[in-house]
Amino acid sequence: MKWFQEKLYGHHKQMLSMSAVLYHWRTEFQDVLIFENPVFGKVLVLDGIVQLTERDNHIYHEMIAHVPLMAHGSARDVLIIGGGDGGTLKEVLKHPVDRATLVEIDGEVIDLSRRFLPDVSGGAFDDPRTTVLVMDGTRYIAETATQFDVIVIDSTDPLGPGEKLFTPAFYRACRSRLRPGGVIAVQSGAPFFQPMELDQVCGRLAASFAGVRPYLAPVPTYAGGMLALVAAGASNDVLRPPCKVLRERFGALDGKTRYYTPEVHRAAFTLAPSLAPSPLRE
Ligand code: SAM
C-alpha cells in the first residue's frame, strides 16, 4: 500500500493511505496532489499539506463562511480570497447574497477541484452570482474599488503564495474594502502546532479592527484535529451575537448545514486558556 506523509512540524507526521493517486503536478505556484483514501474519500494536498478531504471539508467550509455571514446578518457582497476548491463559495451562496467574488492565485487549483472534487463546490462556480478572478489576492485588494460586507481569507498557510495574505498591510487593505458593519474571517492554522500563527493573525488584525476573536473548528485531517479561525469586525459582540439573534438569522439556512448551527457558532468562540492567543489573553 502507498502512503502520503504530511510533515508540517519537526517531530510530528500524519499519514494517509493512498488507494489511488488521481493527479500529481507542479503548477506555476505549488505542488498539487489529489489521491483517494478509503476513509476520507478524495484528498487535495498543496505543497505537501492537506487542504481538504471529501469527508470532513464541510466542517471547515461551513465555519469559515457561516460564522462571518451570520455575524453580519445581511451581507450582500462577499469576497473570498483563495478558496480555489469552491467549498467556501458553496457555503456563501447558501445565503441570500447578491454577489460572491472569488480571487484565487492559482487557476489550476480551480480547474482541478472542479474536475476531481466537483461535490466540494457543488455547482457554485456556475451560480450567476459568482465572479471568479485568477490573480493574487493582495493585488486585487490593493486595486479594487469595490466595497464588501464580508471578506473570507481561505488561504494556504503563511508559506509560499499564501504568505502575503497574513501581513498587517493586507489586513489594513481588507479593512478599507469593508462597508461599515463589515466582518472578516481568516484561516489561522493548527492552534496546537502553530500557536505563533494564531497569535500573529490576532495581533495583526487588532491593529485594524476593534473586535477580534479566535474560534475553533474540529477538522480530523488537519494536524492536531483542530483548526483555528479568527473573525474581526467593529466589536467583539458583533462577532458572537446572542443565540436568539443567530436563530432568527438561521431561518433560511436551516437544513442546509451539516455542522454549523447558532449554538455551534457561539460555542466555537470558547477557547481553553492554553489555546487562547497571547495578544488576547486577559
Ligand atoms: N482549507 C484550506 C487549508 O487547508 O488551509 C485552504 C484551501 S484553499 C485550496 C487555499 C488556496 O489559497 C489555494 O488554492 C491557494 O492557491 C490560494 N492562495 C494562496 N495564496 C494566495 C494569494 N496570494 N492570493 C490568492 N489566493 C491564494
Image (cartoon, rainbow, N blue to C red):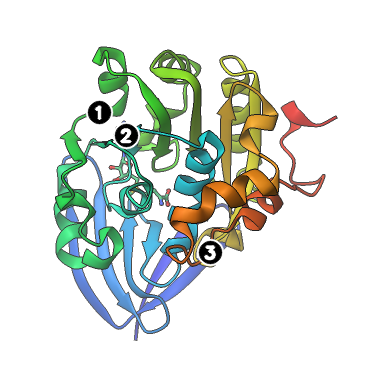
The answer to whether one can see residue 199 in this image is: no
Residue where numbered disc 1 is placed: 136
Q: In this rendering, is residue 181 above or below 20? A: above
- What residue is at 57 percent from the left and 23 percent from the top? 205
User: Considering the image in quadrants, where does the N terminus appear?
Assistant: bottom left
Left or right relative to 136: residue 72: right
Q: Which mark is residue 269?
A: none
Across and down, in percent, residue 261 comes to: 58, 58
Across and down, in percent, residue 213 comes to: 66, 34
Q: Residues within 10 Å of mark 1 (few under 14, many from 20)?
A: some
| Residue 138 position by quadrant | top left
The answer to whether one can see residue 42 in this image is: yes
- What residue is at 27 percent from the left and 58 percent from the top? 121
Residue type indicated by callout 2: Pro
Q: In this rendering, is residue 208 above or below 194? A: above
Across and down, in percent, residue 203 comes to: 64, 23
Q: In this rendering, is residue 156 above or below 258? A: above
Element marked by disc 2: helix
Ligand 1 within 8 Å of disc 1? The answer is yes
**Which one is closest to the eye, mark 2 or mark 1?**
1
Work out whether mark 3 precedes mark 1 in sequence or the reverse, and give the earlier one: 1
Work out whether mark 2 precedes mark 1 in sequence or the reverse, and give the earlier one: 1
Residue where numbered disc 3 is placed: 259
Residue where numbered disc 2 is placed: 161
2 and 1 marks in contact (CB < 8 Å): yes
Q: In this rendering, is residue 57 above or below 282? A: below
